[in-house]
């Protein structure tokens, strides 16, 4: 590897007003390398991505691509030919075809010749081995196919460095596997990737080198093979990390106690087949499964977001009216929805308002909501969940991802649920917040309530006392605490044998 | 307050006051300086402007429009829109009168089915029914709200013309006249009613759980649903309230002028939207206050008043009206510092 590095950033300083977002950090990505950039929320990763993609102008330091200095700030076309970023939110136009998306605003002069455009798109996709029909509309693609299209588009501009910002956040395990396979192929062609992820397991799977930032500073850069997972977590958090293979210990699950949450023959056509569950006081039940396994639908049905086509749900023996969130709430079911942007938060409203959304009937007499009591309530929530905010009045959209998720959790806990249903509660949050959030779920159960975690993240499932694996709408395996990663993943992928 | 980790104990009281101040969204007051400037201009243009008679008449003239804005603001905050309000203001009184007026003797032949005292309740009921139909179309059939209410607007205007055969009705029930003409404490009843309704609406949005729910529904309906808010039911109620307010505006308007013209309310919806948006209500839902909406109405009406007093030829009114809307929109955009959507 004597070639000039695909990206060489040195001594980058960036200030936003009084905040120092980057304190003379460095980053070097070699051609054909997958380089992970990790760090907790607020470490400066996004700012660095902004600088190396030409969206922010650094206050000091130099950026070079392939040995040549970076284009002038603001020259978008020149930047596009050097580097591209595939964001969490897709940048393709959903109602246009793949071909049109690929050549958007790059049509040849004169009227558009559609036949030619399709052929060029097909050639481009074939060149990078992307198996997508250029004639389908972008909205019909799967998430990873959309990412392939964005990558192919970026490469066709001449970029040889692709920044992937949390590319796996919305993918199931299969999608991730297909994405990684594609990325490795492209690496072999000399494309370099800067991979931003909270998912350390993926860093070890895909990347060859890793750089850690903490509090706007560069901490370490090392080949992945030479950095143990514990050391990596320690570098990110600045303290010795807890072993990632931690499991829920033998808890005080009262085996003889009557179940808090019982589910009998619950089914939803097209999503999951009849399932029976019983969650005892003090127990955390995990529902593991990939994207189309039906575990999310099951969680949403428990919370009343969807109406089951058969079966019943009961809390402490009392049947809950199906398909009604208010009735589920009154029965004591708390709900942490899957996607905080879609179902969790009202972005333009304050932290206090979001956190008290489920308890507006308890904040004043005769249907009134008293601002003083709302703030009071929110403050106690902020304190008990350690939400980092300027105060209850701050708009929730101004919080970091982990703290936003805590607000969603606060909302679910506000009614003191006896059965908590959490769907992917730690999606897109940093390591530290993740631990805090899972500890909260555990705490709810330890107080004698029931909790259900619906997820495909092994770290989420580790806090569970019992895990059921779903595949194509059926429960295919059940594990007590102490399962191995391999067997659970195999069960979620439908390759495990039934116990 | 003691458990707040972010504030030092010494500055607690001070921080509390500042925090309360931080809850005031200055964008809601962005039109207040505009109104003050308009009043200064009005004073310079004509000495008549600052007389109480003139100012009361400005408010009187804006009372019907402001009721429509009140209804529309509530509907917009919860993320919907209702164009048919401008037809409701005409059709609701017409149907009420059609049902109560005798079939013979007057210029307008009613059905005479119900006693005259039912005119006001009937009129309000028609408004609620129209809102409920809009709700049915949007929430149960899930059709596009803009086009559905546009259809309702046209259809109801047609119904109005059909029933009245395109003529004005001049035999207005006494109860309508009373509300439109009476003075309470030196100002028209309509003004007091209007201000009261805005105050009640504003208080409901600030302090009632169902009022707060409108912001959650408009801001993110899925999140509201996941939090146990009955999104459809509340939206439906708000649409019905919108219809009710429009029908009530119809009563005041009819009572004030002593007749219902075939064009009553025609074209108002543009003013309604303009007033709401320059008053800081977001067309995408979840944002804005009724105070802002009220300042929006007053701004538009004051401009018209100042132009009239200033002797601007009536033929240029429409041009200036449109121009003023755009200028006010730009002013409120930059005064509030927020993007409008």
Image (cartoon, rainbow, N blue to C red):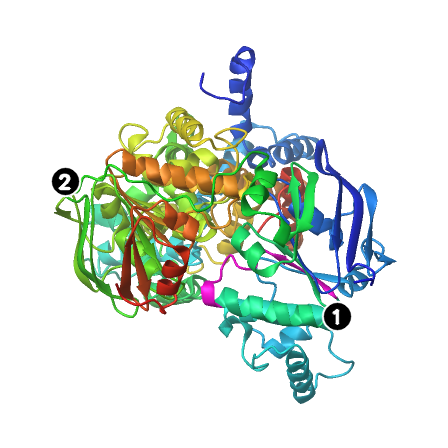
Q: Quadrant of the C terminus of chain A?
A: bottom left
Judge whether residue B42 is colored magenta: no
Residue B254 in view of the camera:
no
> Outermost residue toward the right?
A68
Q: Which residue is mark 2?
A: A257
In front of the other: A264 or A235: A235
Up/down of B62 relative to A272, above or below = above
Work out how far the residue at label 1 is from the one at label 2, CA to CA, in angstroms: 64 Å
Q: Say how many tags the image has.
A: 2
Would residue A78 appear left or right of A322 to someone viewing this image? Answer: right
- Residue at image position (70%, 35%) is B45
The label shown at residue A157 is: 1
Q: Which corner quadrant of the image does residue A109 belong to? A: bottom right
Residue A390 in view of the camera:
yes
- Judging from the image, mark 1 belongs to the subunit labelled A
How packed mark 1 is, by other alpha carbons closer than 10 Å (few <14, some 14-19, many 20 or more), is some
Up/down of A67 relative to B10, above or below = below
> Outermost residue toward the top?
B10
Q: Which residues are magenta?
A: A160-174
Give the percent coordinates (x, y) of residue B220. 44, 50
Query: Same chain for marks 1 and 2?
Result: yes
Up/down of A492 relative to A467, above or below = below
Give the percent coordinates (x, y) of residue A472. 32, 69
Would residue A325 appear left or right of B150 to someone viewing this image? Answer: left
Instruction: Give SS at disc 2.
Output: loop
Judge whether residue A173 is colored magenta: yes
Give the percent coordinates (x, y) of residue A65. 81, 59
Give the percent coordinates (x, y) of residue B157. 40, 63
Instruction: Give SS at disc 1.
Output: loop
């Amino acid at each position: 590897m004597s070639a000039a590095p695909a990206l060489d950033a040195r001594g980058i300083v960036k200030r936003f007003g009084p905040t120092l977002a980057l304190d003379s950090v460095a980053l070097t990505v070699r051609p054909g390398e997958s380089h992970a950039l990790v760090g907790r929320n607020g470490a400066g990763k996004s700012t660095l991505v902004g600088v190396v993609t030409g969206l922010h102008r650094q206050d000091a330091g130099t950026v070079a691509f392939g040995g040549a200095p970076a284009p002038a700030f603001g020259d978008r076309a020149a930047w596009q030919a050097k580097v591209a970023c595939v964001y969490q939110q897709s940048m393709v136009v959903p109602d246009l075809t793949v071909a049109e998306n690929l050549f958007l605003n790059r049509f040849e002069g004169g009227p558009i010749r559609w036949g030619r455009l399709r052929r060029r798109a097909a050639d481009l996709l074939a060149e990078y081995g992307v198996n997508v029909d250029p004639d389908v509309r972008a909205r019909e693609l799967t998430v990873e196919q959309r990412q392939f299209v964005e990558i192919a588009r970026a490469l066709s501009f001449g970029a040889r460095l692709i920044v992937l910002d949390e590319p796996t956040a919305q993918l199931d395990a299969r999608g991730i596997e297909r994405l990684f396979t594609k990325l490795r192929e492209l690496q072999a062609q000399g494309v370099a990737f800067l991979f931003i992820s909270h998912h350390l397991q993926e860093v070890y799977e895909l990347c060859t080198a890793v750089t850690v930032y903490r509090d706007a500073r560069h901490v370490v850069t090392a080949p992945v093979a030479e950095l143990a997972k514990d050391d990596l977590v320690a570098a990110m958090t600045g303290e010795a990390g807890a072993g990632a293979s931690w499991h829920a210990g033998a808890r005080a699950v009262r085996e003889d106690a009557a179940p808090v949450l019982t589910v009998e023959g619950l089914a939803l056509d097209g999503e999951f087949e009849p399932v029976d569950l019983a969650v005892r006081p003090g127990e955390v039940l995990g529902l593991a499964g990939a994207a189309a396994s039906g575990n999310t639908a099951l969680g949403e049905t428990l919370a009343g977001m969807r109406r089951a086509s058969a079966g019943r749900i009961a809390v402490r023996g009392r049947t809950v009216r199906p398909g009604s969130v208010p009735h589920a709430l009154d029965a004591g079911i708390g709900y942490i929805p899957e996607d905080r942007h879609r179902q969790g938060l009202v972005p333009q409203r304050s932290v206090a308002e979001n956190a008290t959304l489920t308890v507006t009937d308890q904040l004043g007499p005769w249907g009134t909501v008293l601002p003083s009591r709302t703030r009071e309530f929110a403050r106690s929530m902020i304190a008990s969940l350690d939400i980092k905010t300027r105060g209850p009045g701050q708009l929730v959209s101004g919080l970091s991802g982990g703290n936003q998720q805590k607000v969603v959790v606060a909302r679910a806990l506000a009614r003191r649920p006896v059965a908590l249903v959490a769907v992917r509660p730690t999606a897109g949050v940093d390591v530290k917040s993740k631990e805090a959030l899972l500890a909260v779920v555990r705490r709810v159960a330890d107080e004698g309530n029931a909790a259900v975690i619906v997820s495909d993240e092994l770290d989420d499932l580790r806090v569970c006392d019992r895990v059921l694996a779903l595949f194509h709408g059926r429960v295919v395996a059940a594990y007590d605490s102490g399962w191995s990663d391999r067997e659970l993943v195999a069960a979620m992928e439908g390759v495990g044998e039934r116990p | 307050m003691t458990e707040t980790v972010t504030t030092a104990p010494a500055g607690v009281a001070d921080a509390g006051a500042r925090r309360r101040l931080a809850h005031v969204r200055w964008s809601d007051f962005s039109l207040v300086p505009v109104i003050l400037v308009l009043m200064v201009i009005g004073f310079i243009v004509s000495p008549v402007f600052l007389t109480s008679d003139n100012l009361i008449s400005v408010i009187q003239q804006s009372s019907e429009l402001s009721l429509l804005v009140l209804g529309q603001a509530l509907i917009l905050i919860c993320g919907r829109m209702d164009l048919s309000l401008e037809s409701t203001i005409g059709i609701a009184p017409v149907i009420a009168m059609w049902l109560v007026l005798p079939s013979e003797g007057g210029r307008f032949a009613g059905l005479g089915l119900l006693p005259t005292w039912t005119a006001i309740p009937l009129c309000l009921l028609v408004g609620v029914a129209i809102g409920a139909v809009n709700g049915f179309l949007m929430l149960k059939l899930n059709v596009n709200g803009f086009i559905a209410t546009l259809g309702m607007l046209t259809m109801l205007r047609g119904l109005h013309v059909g029933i009245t055969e395109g003529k004005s009705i001049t035999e207005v029930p006494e109860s309508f006249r009373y509300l439109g003409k009476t003075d309470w404490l030196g100002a028209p009843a309509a003004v007091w009613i209007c201000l009261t309704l805005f105050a009640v609406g504003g208080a409901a949005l600030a302090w009632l759980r169902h009022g707060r729910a409108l912001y959650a529904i408009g801001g993110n309906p899925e999140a509201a649903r996941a939090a146990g808010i009955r999104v459809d039911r509340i939206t439906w109620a708000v649409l019905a309230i919108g219809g009710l307010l429009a029908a009530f505006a119809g009563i005041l308007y009819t009572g004030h002028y002593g007749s219902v013209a075939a064009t009553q309310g025609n074209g108002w919806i543009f003013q309604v939207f303009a007033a709401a948006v320059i008053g800081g209500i977001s067309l995408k839902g979840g944002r804005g206050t009724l105070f802002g909406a009220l300042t929006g109405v007053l701004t538009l009406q004051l401009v018209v008043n100042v132009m009239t007093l200033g002797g601007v030829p009536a033929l240029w009114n429409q041009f200036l009206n449109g121009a003023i809307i755009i200028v006010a929109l730009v002013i409120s955009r930059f005064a509030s510092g927020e993007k409008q959507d």
